[in-house]
Amino acid sequence: MPTLDFKGKQFVHSHHLSVPFRELQVVPKKSLPGKGRKPSLDDNLIIHGDNLEALKALLPTHAGKVDCIFIDPPYNTGNEGWCYNDNVRSPLMREWIKKAANPVDKEDLERHDKWLCMMWPRLQLLRELLAEDGAIFITIDDNEVHRLRLIMDEIFGEEGFITAITWQARYSRSNDAVFSLSHNTVLVYGKDTAAWEKTRNLLDRDAKQETQYTNPDNDPRGPWRAIPWDAPNIRENLSYPIKTPTGKTKFPPSGRHWSRTEDKWKEIVAAGLDYYGRDGNGSPSYKAFLKDASGIVPNTWWAHDDAGHTDEAKKELIEILGTENLAFATPKPCRLLERILQVATQKDSLILDSFAGSGTTAHAVLAANARDGGNRRFILVESENYADTLTAERIRRVIQGYSFTGTQRTELLREKVTWRVFEKADEMLEKIKSIEQLEGAGYDNVKKEIKDGVLIVTGLRSVEEKTPGLGGSFTYCELGDPIEIETLLTGGDGMPTYESLARYVYYTATGRSLEKVAAPKADGFIGETEQYRLHLIYKPDKEWLRGNDAALDTKKLAAIEKGNRGGKRAIVFAVAKFMSQRELSARRIEFCQLPYAVHKILGD
């Protein structure tokens, strides 16, 4: 498989493995827990901190559990002001960080290399967090889309590619450009594409699709559409004769065959579903009724009518937060995220956005839950200082409702008025009527206007003083000090809690996340796999750690063996032991000394 080489690749290839673990520390004052509850890491999360370190912090609890990932990384246009500052131990990287060209701008001849170095380890960790049947959606533009495709193929495998969606991010035309840029790309990859295809959803049928169903013969079963019975290519066993009601015999058109067997066609006829055109002498087809129709397969062209656009996104953000302190210039519209959620999530899915920005992903998750009663959860990561004042503040206001007096406007349809629209005026009027019937009940009025050659249908809702909240909750977190195992015995405020160290040693030993950490027990049991039981003897107290109670002794050994009814191999983490490893090995126990022996041991 072809690979992409870039400056610094050899230094970042495994950098995600050396990123230190940090404990997620809850900030109660910035959290918004549910009524009667305390902030909890089991809730929706908004994490402030470097997203590489935040992703590493999530591994012990969320590895392989995230159903849908959406990221909107810097597009590397040269105008965004992003910096490359990962702590990679190489002179090249340290020189990059020192250079005046950091932040990265258009004059930086190495900006593509830096962008790839920044993305590589983050994508590695995102892949570890993704569920086997999950998918990652990445918005990008032409500056880096070709390079991103190549490194995604390396990290997820070529077989991980699902599709590349073209999203019409802008609807206006830039007449001063050589070509007016109207789109962004949304790359979609998965760990196991076959598994994802089984879980992905169809899109709801909109008014336009439903107008394809009519009832010209007043069939009591309701509106229907004719599906041709022929299919491409020639198969002799599917080229049988079919008689029309007028007595004529039909064979498949040249170069085609009937889509299914003759017996299946006879079933169609027996059910009264066969159709031969208005005169009864056309090519055979069958009726598919609207009442039986399922959703539609998503395509790779997402028009702004369906998935929103950048102007809409800015208006959404201004309405919620006002124009003051609007630090985020490139938000994504809720409708784009809502469409992704509709395709890629279930009612109980976990959604991660590690370039959270203005918080659109969380907004869309809350809106989806409010709409269908779901219990989707989100995790946002934002490294910038506006994580509280913009990202989290938007979500607080969306949950609780926000101050607003006036008319809320929601764009329901936008379509350029062309000659074809005039030719099919009846279809357009029917489409507008369907929108009014399906969505109008949620608004005080539905406004229709033609402005600058564009037909716009807008839902209007009068709001006095405050918008209704969507409900929900979240816990706000900061990243704590790195869990430096080598300095455990020095004590201090940076010592990890029992729970965080338990999750850490369990993940590093097994590569899996620990579902739940029980209170410390006599045998230090923290969890097990199919082959191993893991134990941690630890307290975040330097005096205790230096005493005999912190060692594996005969009493703790007896407790460990008593609880091991299945005869599995036991792995014990402690600072010391009072017996030889030979004796422990004979009793199927592996001792790992803290702070030096925390490493991945499966397969050793």
Image (tube, rainbow, N blue to C red):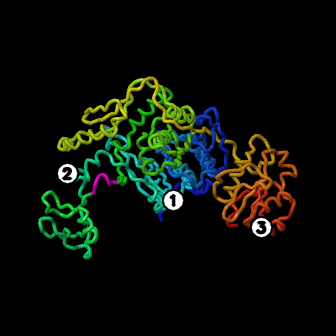
Is residue 548 found left or right of 343 in the rendered image? Answer: right
Please say whether residue 441 is one of the residues in the magenta stretch.
no
Residue type, numbered disc 3: Arg
Q: Can you see residue 355?
A: yes
Q: Do tag 2 and tag 1 residues touch (Cβ < 8 Å)?
A: no
Which span is picked out in magenta? 288-293
The residue beneath circle 3 is 588
In which quadrant is the C terminus drawn? bottom right
Q: Residue at x 65, y 54 (%)?
A: 514
Q: Nearer the viewer, mark 2 or mark 3?
A: 2
Q: Nearer the viewer, residue 484 or 291?
A: 291
Q: Quadrant of residue 23?
A: top right
Q: Nearer the viewer, residue 421 or 430?
A: 430
The residue beneath circle 1 is 191
The residue beneath circle 2 is 218
Q: Do tag 1 and tag 3 residues touch (Cβ < 8 Å)?
A: no
Residue type, numbered disc 1: Lys
* Residue 442 image point, x, y percent: 37, 34
Please say whether residue 289 is one of the residues in the magenta stretch.
yes
